[in-house]
Image (cartoon, rainbow, N blue to C red):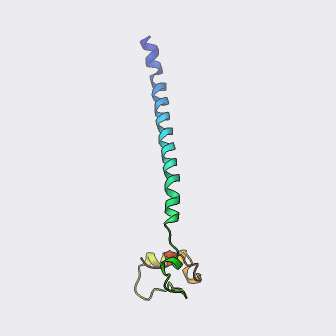
Amino acid sequence: MTDKLNRFWPLIASAAFAILLAANAAQSAATLRETRPVAQSGTQTAEQVFADAPDGVDPMVTGPVSASFKQRQDTANCDSAVWPNIPMVCYPD
């Protein structure tokens, strides 16, 4: 009897590991679904941030900026953006 149990021990351990892995994946997927809408609703547009500027705010920065900021602006096509559809990425932090 002990020999038969020892033979099935790796199978039992593998099944238990698979169940734990599936439960962890399900919890991770549920967490991602819960947090995604919160991040989207917290996003503000340039029109909301600069509500006191009815004619808009130009995202042109006149001072020194980092190379990564310039790259972010190039990626977001900030030079061709038109008010009020200017991404907040175009403005410095």
Q: Quadrant of residue 78?
A: bottom right
Q: Residue at x 59, y 83 (%)?
A: 82
In the foreground, 87 or 35: 35
Q: Residue at x 50, y 75 (%)?
A: 88
Percent coordinates x, y for residue 79 in the rendering: 56, 83
| Quadrant placement of the N terminus | top left
Percent coordinates x, y for residue 84 in the rendering: 57, 80
Q: Residue at x 49, y 86 (%)?
A: 60
Q: Is residue 35 above or below residue 48?
A: above
Percent coordinates x, y for residue 2 in the rendering: 42, 13
Q: Is residue 73 left or right of residue 82?
A: left
Q: Quadrant of residue 77?
A: bottom right
Q: Is residue 78 above or below residue 19?
A: below
Percent coordinates x, y for residue 29 in the rendering: 52, 48
| Quadrant placement of the C terminus | bottom left
Q: Is residue 25 above or below residue 63?
A: above
How many numbered marks, from 0 up? Answer: 0
